[in-house]
Amino acid sequence: PPRGITSTDLYNYHQKNMRCRRFSTSNVSHDPPSSTTDGRLPKDFISTLRSLHPDLKISTNYYDLESHGHGESYHPSAPPDAVIYPKNEDEIVDILRLCCRQVVDDITTITNKNTEAGDGITTVEVVSVIPYGAGTSLEGHLCFLHSGNGSDIDEIVDIPTSLFNNPGNDISDKFQKVRVKRKGGISIDMSFFQSIGEVASGDLFVKVGAGVTRNSLNAALRHTGMQFMVDPGANCTIGGMVACGASGTAAVKYGTMRENVLALRAVIPPTIVSSDIEISERNRPLVVQFGTNALKSSAGYDLPALLTGSEGTLGIITEVTLRLHPIPSNVVAASCAFDDLHSAAEAVAMIRMMGVPVSRCELLDEASVRAFNHSLYL
């Protein structure tokens, strides 16, 4: 590289350039979308949230929507209709409660079925929800599947009547037809969940907010001599790493996120569907603590492992208790060249069988080396 410019500088410039190129060539309209009050979200969705939480940050800015509609994968951007930035679990509870509501004709009689289509079928409005961390995932799950279509998407399905708090007396009443109207989607940005707990002497765990990034956590832990060892490569958030079941090159010694999550808190959806005026403990989303601080426990189901890798489909993770490891006093790195992939795999298996304490192990084939050299302009 030219004098004064390092390979790291070139690499960072190249990554920013690729992000701008992907943004400018993505298969989306570059005209700013219309206001969500006239768009796909329920007409009272934003206003109701603002009345419940006046300080809640809600963005319908075009560039905020665009940046929350894709990760680092090749998928084109499919933006949400609004980006919401909650600061506590109570705000998430009310957001989820408004994302699945029964529509009624007469708000004074909540037991009446909606008959706007003339068929007497109950109508339920559903707003898609995707939690957002740092946007570094590669799976494409940040894209909203129903993006780009301004009309409602309706489907009639059979669901248990118990979801409406109205169980029938015989088997024929156990299910009822429901018209599901998909009313756009929202992205819940967890960047305000930045808490990092204290690490007491002798503790091998720490509690952190879902929006804390991996690098900032290790920087805060440096004075303790402990470190969080899961390293997927990107500076992603802890909540996103749990949701995606992240791993990395250090998994050969320290395991993946599944082995390093001791406990977590999450907001899960309510057990029944109701209208706006039906507010009870049963139809409120639940804030649940899964797991304990113990390094070993055989009591009950391994629920933290169930939510690890769930990608936001089971609940919104707000706090995570992580396993910590001592920072190694010495680190030695080595690279080995092999004639073929089979020989490389055999060497790794032999190293493991011989008990060599390898902390990281990564395989780079010919295509990977070519891609790295190209990204560094070598």
Image (cartoon, grey):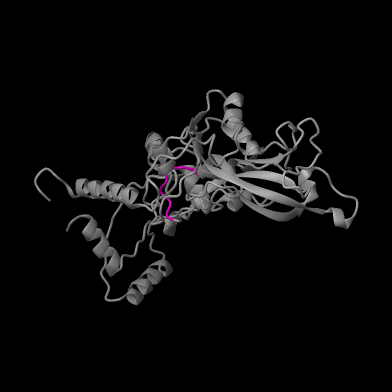
Residue sitting at x 41%, y 38%: 62
The answer to whether residue 267 is seen in the rendering is yes
- Residue sitting at x 42%, y 55%: 138
For residue 365, side relative to residue 199 (left or right): left
Kindly give the residue lying farthest to the right in the view shown.
169
Q: Is residue 322 left or right of residue 61?
A: right
In the rendering, at what x and y percent does residue 119 appear? 77, 50
Q: Is residue 2 left or right of residue 147?
A: left
In which quarter of the view is residue 98 placed?
top right
Q: Which residues are magenta?
A: 132-138
Where residue 300 sits in the image (x, y, percent)?
Answer: 69, 50
Task: Look at the image and say whether residue 343 sits in the magenta stretch.
Answer: no
Q: At which x and y percent is residue 32?
A: 40, 39
The vertical placement of 37 against 182, above or below, is above
Image point (14%, 45%), residue name: 5
The front one of 138 and 198 is: 138
Percent x, y for residue 215? 37, 41
- Magenta: main secondary structure equals loop
Q: Quadrant of the C terminus?
A: bottom left
Left or right relative to 251: residue 319:
right
